[in-house]
Image (cartoon, rainbow, N blue to C red):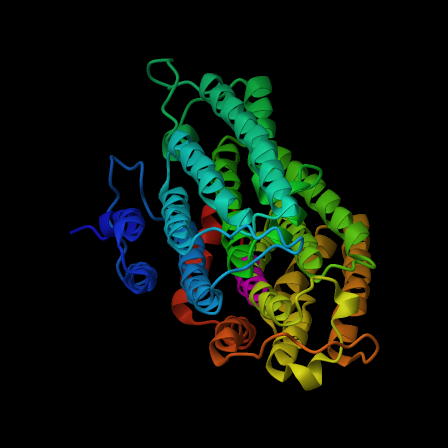
Amino acid sequence: MNLLVPLLLAPLFSSAIIMILPNKKLGKILFLTTGAIHLTIVFFFWFEKPFPILKGWLELDSLGLLILSLMSLLFFCASIAATNHLAHTTLLRNRDKTGRKVLSEKKTLAVMLLFLESMTLSTLSQHLGLFWIAIEATTLASAPLISYHRHPRSVEATWKYLLICSVGIALAFIGNIFLSLSITDPGSGSTVSLLIRDLAASGRPRDSLFKTAFIFLFVGYGTKIGLSPLHTWLPDAHSEAPAFMSSLLSGALLNGAFLGILRISTIYTAQGESAFIQRIFMLFGLISLLTALVFMIRQKDYKRLLAYSSIEHMGILALGFGLGGRGVYGALLHLLNHSLIKGALFLTAGNILALYGTKKAPKVRFMLQKLPGSSFLWITGFLAITAFPPFGLFFSEFIIAKTALESGRVLVSIIFFLALTLIFIGSAYLFLPMVLGKDGAREPGKKETPLSLAVPLLLLVLSLLLGIYFPAPLAEVVEKAVLYLGGSI
């Protein structure tokens, strides 16, 4: 039996079963079991590649395996955090004391599984039409969890997320149409299918429409990635969603949309337009990096700071892919490490929010004595996300910077180094006083639990290990993905 089938069907059926189960405890068990099964199947794919299904519409390549593995791991970690959160939450009320309940436990678990289903479909999709449907499904599946707390701010963030991402998905739909019309079959002269391999092997496209299609596709899916200037949904959504969902939004959802752009870029590379797409990657990468810099300096809300940090790192990814060559290798390493670290940071931020009851950094002080476990994770995460060695982000950013200098892009290098330096200062200004400060200290409302510390610790340890030791199977898959994208090791 092809394991792609249960990989796709398990989350869907489990979601439906959870909604009809009368026992909440059984629902949690099924939820965690489904996440574990999904992760186990993905683990097997590292040793035996699954056969394509639906005539190649669904196929797992090396790039997809990387994204799928990250997503599955983060979902399993988030599922543990979610069940732990629900176990310690009987009835949450908004700060305005209206008494409105949060999203029910059943709906929370069911919607998270639908998110897992849609993300899995997007990583396997080799057809641009099917990928478009999968990305839209991720939007619809994640929206209820952004409005989880039913607070006016979370509802506003949800509507902003839906509206802006709907505009993006509409632009991507137009891009698909333009791309289909611009490419013809070399034999019959008719338009080809939207399978990526068919588009890459097609006849010479009409240049103007072909290039216009990429701009629409890049901007459309770039909206879902959070690339500036269409990033405005991201800080609100990531800061208002519960921590377990924020970790998935930043560590998994953004990667899924990026995967689509990367696969589309292989079509243009095959048609000899690599220089054109690299300029677009670099332009949006630098704009996103500078946009994040502006908002991260003197930021007061620690969850919003993490959200803007995601915009920063998506910009770095785009810059690395835009540089080409070894920059592609550095960007893939960056993608792996950013997902792990940001997932850990958002889960730790959830601990701080649950314990202190505020997202305002100036109101969180003296954590080192009051919350030693979360303090350790918070500072370690700060060092990891700002690329301190030996964490993996240090090596990925070093490779990207080195590639920029070797390719003679001095101005890009200066902007890159300056932005990272200022972002480090801005982040330190928020992170360090939370742990070491004494003024304005307040007693936490709850105590830390071992489970709430173990999950983010695991993700940080994995990032640390990737900086120290790169396993041979992972190195092989990364190398294949780099070559697939036209880069070099």
Outermost residue on the front side: it is 98
Outermost residue on the left side: it is 1
Q: Which residues are magenta?
A: 335-344
Front one among 303 and 261: 303
Outermost residue on the top side: it is 189
Say which residue appears at 80% left-offset and 63% top-offset.
Answer: 426
x and y percent of residue 451 in the render?
47, 76
Say which residue appears at 43% left-offset and 59% top-offset.
Answer: 75
Judged left or right of residue 401, residue 419 is right
Quadrant position of residue 436: bottom right
Question: How many labels sit on residues?
Answer: 0
Dominant secondary structure of the magenta stretch?
helix
Front one among 318 and 447: 447
x and y percent of residue 210 in the render?
54, 22
The answer to whether residue 273 is visible is no
x and y percent of residue 382 in the render?
68, 70
Say which residue appears at 65% left-offset and 68% top-offset.
Answer: 394
Judged left or right of residue 303, residue 8 is left
The answer to whether residue 118 is visible is yes
Front one among 120 and 67: 120
Quadrant position of residue 131: top left
Quadrant position of residue 141: top left
| The magenta stretch spans residue 168 | no
x and y percent of residue 376 in the render?
63, 80
Front one among 189 and 448: 448
Say which residue appears at 58% left-offset and 57% top-offset.
Answer: 93
